[in-house]
Image (cartoon, rainbow, N blue to C red):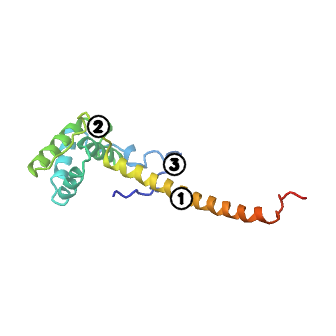
Amino acid sequence: MAELQAPILDGPIPGQSLTSELGNRPWQQPPQYTTVEEAIEFYIKRLVDPNFVPELMNVIEMGVPLTTIANAMQVGGVMQGLHTIDVGILVMPVIIEMMAYMAEQEEIDYLTGTEKQKQDRPKSGTVEVALGKLRKEMKTVEDVTTEDELAVTEEQDVDTGTAKGLMARRA
Protein backbone atom coordinates (compact mmCIF):
# COMPACT_ATOMS: atom_id res chain seq x y z
CA MET A 1 0.00 0.00 0.00
CA ALA A 2 1.35 3.41 -0.92
CA GLU A 3 2.12 5.71 1.96
CA LEU A 4 0.70 9.21 1.90
CA GLN A 5 3.36 11.79 2.55
CA ALA A 6 2.86 14.75 4.82
CA PRO A 7 2.94 18.11 3.03
CA ILE A 8 6.37 19.64 2.80
CA LEU A 9 6.42 22.90 4.69
CA ASP A 10 9.94 23.94 3.73
CA GLY A 11 8.79 25.98 0.73
CA PRO A 12 9.31 29.69 0.33
CA ILE A 13 7.00 32.10 2.11
CA PRO A 14 4.74 34.07 -0.28
CA GLY A 15 6.46 37.36 -1.09
CA GLN A 16 9.86 36.08 0.04
CA SER A 17 11.33 36.80 -3.39
CA LEU A 18 10.54 40.46 -2.84
CA THR A 19 12.56 40.63 0.38
CA SER A 20 15.98 39.65 -0.96
CA GLU A 21 18.35 41.65 -3.08
CA LEU A 22 17.92 41.36 -6.81
CA GLY A 23 20.40 38.84 -8.18
CA ASN A 24 20.81 36.74 -5.00
CA ARG A 25 18.81 33.79 -6.35
CA PRO A 26 20.38 31.21 -8.69
CA TRP A 27 17.75 31.78 -11.39
CA GLN A 28 18.49 35.52 -11.33
CA GLN A 29 22.08 34.94 -12.42
CA PRO A 30 23.33 34.18 -15.93
CA PRO A 31 22.89 30.44 -16.63
CA GLN A 32 25.81 28.05 -16.38
CA TYR A 33 24.89 26.34 -19.69
CA THR A 34 23.78 28.77 -22.36
CA THR A 35 23.32 26.42 -25.31
CA VAL A 36 21.19 23.34 -25.80
CA GLU A 37 24.27 21.26 -26.57
CA GLU A 38 25.93 22.17 -23.27
CA ALA A 39 22.76 21.34 -21.35
CA ILE A 40 22.37 18.01 -23.18
CA GLU A 41 25.95 17.12 -22.31
CA PHE A 42 25.27 17.91 -18.64
CA TYR A 43 22.10 15.78 -18.51
CA ILE A 44 23.60 12.83 -20.40
CA LYS A 45 26.52 12.70 -17.95
CA ARG A 46 24.03 12.82 -15.09
CA LEU A 47 21.79 10.10 -16.58
CA VAL A 48 24.64 7.61 -17.09
CA ASP A 49 26.12 8.16 -13.62
CA PRO A 50 26.38 4.69 -11.98
CA ASN A 51 24.92 6.03 -8.73
CA PHE A 52 21.90 7.54 -10.51
CA VAL A 53 20.96 4.72 -12.91
CA PRO A 54 19.52 2.21 -10.36
CA GLU A 55 17.32 4.86 -8.76
CA LEU A 56 16.13 6.07 -12.15
CA MET A 57 15.29 2.53 -13.23
CA ASN A 58 13.32 1.97 -10.01
CA VAL A 59 11.28 5.11 -10.65
CA ILE A 60 10.61 4.12 -14.27
CA GLU A 61 9.65 0.60 -13.19
CA MET A 62 7.13 2.04 -10.71
CA GLY A 63 5.27 3.51 -13.68
CA VAL A 64 6.24 7.18 -13.52
CA PRO A 65 6.07 8.56 -17.08
CA LEU A 66 9.34 9.62 -18.69
CA THR A 67 7.89 13.05 -19.48
CA THR A 68 7.26 13.65 -15.78
CA ILE A 69 10.82 12.67 -14.84
CA ALA A 70 12.35 14.78 -17.62
CA ASN A 71 10.21 17.79 -16.71
CA ALA A 72 11.22 17.53 -13.04
CA MET A 73 14.88 17.35 -14.03
CA GLN A 74 14.77 20.37 -16.31
CA VAL A 75 12.72 22.49 -13.88
CA GLY A 76 15.27 21.64 -11.18
CA GLY A 77 18.03 22.73 -13.54
CA VAL A 78 16.28 26.06 -14.13
CA MET A 79 15.82 26.62 -10.39
CA GLN A 80 19.51 25.88 -9.78
CA GLY A 81 20.50 28.37 -12.46
CA LEU A 82 22.04 25.73 -14.73
CA HIS A 83 20.12 26.85 -17.82
CA THR A 84 17.15 28.94 -18.88
CA ILE A 85 13.61 27.61 -19.19
CA ASP A 86 13.71 27.69 -23.00
CA VAL A 87 16.91 25.62 -23.08
CA GLY A 88 15.28 23.19 -20.61
CA ILE A 89 12.23 22.74 -22.84
CA LEU A 90 14.44 22.11 -25.86
CA VAL A 91 16.48 19.53 -23.91
CA MET A 92 13.46 17.53 -22.68
CA PRO A 93 13.00 15.33 -25.81
CA VAL A 94 16.66 14.28 -25.63
CA ILE A 95 16.33 13.41 -21.93
CA ILE A 96 13.17 11.38 -22.63
CA GLU A 97 14.80 9.48 -25.50
CA MET A 98 17.88 8.73 -23.40
CA MET A 99 15.76 7.38 -20.52
CA ALA A 100 13.71 5.28 -22.97
CA TYR A 101 16.91 3.82 -24.42
CA MET A 102 18.25 3.03 -20.96
CA ALA A 103 14.96 1.36 -19.94
CA GLU A 104 14.98 -0.74 -23.11
CA GLN A 105 18.56 -1.84 -22.37
CA GLU A 106 17.47 -2.93 -18.89
CA GLU A 107 14.33 -4.59 -20.39
CA ILE A 108 12.02 -2.43 -18.28
CA ASP A 109 8.57 -1.47 -19.53
CA TYR A 110 8.10 2.28 -19.42
CA LEU A 111 5.46 4.93 -20.03
CA THR A 112 6.45 7.91 -22.13
CA GLY A 113 3.57 10.00 -20.84
CA THR A 114 2.20 10.64 -24.32
CA GLU A 115 0.11 7.47 -24.56
CA LYS A 116 -3.64 7.62 -24.22
CA GLN A 117 -4.56 6.05 -20.92
CA LYS A 118 -7.37 3.52 -20.82
CA GLN A 119 -10.24 4.65 -18.67
CA ASP A 120 -11.43 1.08 -18.03
CA ARG A 121 -10.18 1.00 -14.47
CA PRO A 122 -8.63 3.52 -12.10
CA LYS A 123 -4.98 3.53 -11.09
CA SER A 124 -4.06 1.41 -8.08
CA GLY A 125 -3.02 4.48 -6.07
CA THR A 126 -6.45 6.04 -6.61
CA VAL A 127 -8.14 2.85 -5.46
CA GLU A 128 -5.99 2.70 -2.31
CA VAL A 129 -6.79 6.31 -1.41
CA ALA A 130 -10.51 5.69 -1.95
CA LEU A 131 -10.42 2.53 0.18
CA GLY A 132 -8.65 4.41 2.98
CA LYS A 133 -11.35 7.10 2.96
CA LEU A 134 -14.07 4.45 2.95
CA ARG A 135 -12.51 2.66 5.92
CA LYS A 136 -12.39 5.91 7.87
CA GLU A 137 -16.03 6.62 7.04
CA MET A 138 -17.06 3.09 8.04
CA LYS A 139 -15.24 3.45 11.34
CA THR A 140 -17.03 6.71 12.12
CA VAL A 141 -20.39 5.16 11.12
CA GLU A 142 -19.73 2.23 13.47
CA ASP A 143 -18.83 4.63 16.29
CA VAL A 144 -22.01 6.67 15.72
CA THR A 145 -24.11 3.50 15.55
CA THR A 146 -22.81 2.24 18.90
CA GLU A 147 -23.42 5.69 20.44
CA ASP A 148 -27.01 5.67 19.08
CA GLU A 149 -27.61 2.18 20.49
CA LEU A 150 -26.39 3.35 23.89
CA ALA A 151 -28.64 6.42 23.69
CA VAL A 152 -31.67 4.25 22.86
CA THR A 153 -31.05 1.95 25.82
CA GLU A 154 -30.60 4.99 28.08
CA GLU A 155 -33.90 6.45 26.78
CA GLN A 156 -35.65 3.18 27.55
CA ASP A 157 -34.32 3.36 31.10
CA VAL A 158 -35.43 6.99 31.37
CA ASP A 159 -38.95 6.23 30.09
CA THR A 160 -39.57 3.78 32.92
CA GLY A 161 -38.60 6.31 35.58
CA THR A 162 -39.18 9.99 36.01
CA ALA A 163 -37.44 12.39 33.68
CA LYS A 164 -34.57 14.27 35.18
CA GLY A 165 -32.24 16.92 33.86
CA LEU A 166 -32.28 20.48 32.62
CA MET A 167 -34.58 19.89 29.64
CA ALA A 168 -36.97 17.43 31.36
CA ARG A 169 -40.65 18.34 31.43
CA ARG A 170 -42.07 19.26 34.70
CA ALA A 171 -45.24 17.59 35.86
Residue bearing mark 2: 120
Residue 79 at what x, y percent from top left? 36, 46
Q: In this rendered view, identify the residue nearer to me: 83 or 52.
A: 52
Secondary structure beneath label 2: loop
Q: Which amino acid is tagged 3? A: Gln
Q: Could you say where residue 35 lies in the image, as x and y percent from the top left? A: 22, 38
Q: In which quarter of the view is residue 157 placed? A: bottom right
Disc 3 target residue: 16
Residue 161 in the image: above or below residue 31: below
Residue for point 51% across, 48% down:
16
Classify 10 Å Cα crowding around label 1: few (below 14), some (14-19), many (20 and above).
few
Looking at the image, residue 39 sits to the left or right of residue 15; the answer is left
Query: To which residue does mark 1 refer?
Result: 142
User: Are the residues at dot 2 and dot 1 in contact (C-beta closer than 8 Å)?
Assistant: no
At label 2, the amino acid type is Asp
Between 151 and 86, the residue placed more toward the observer is 151
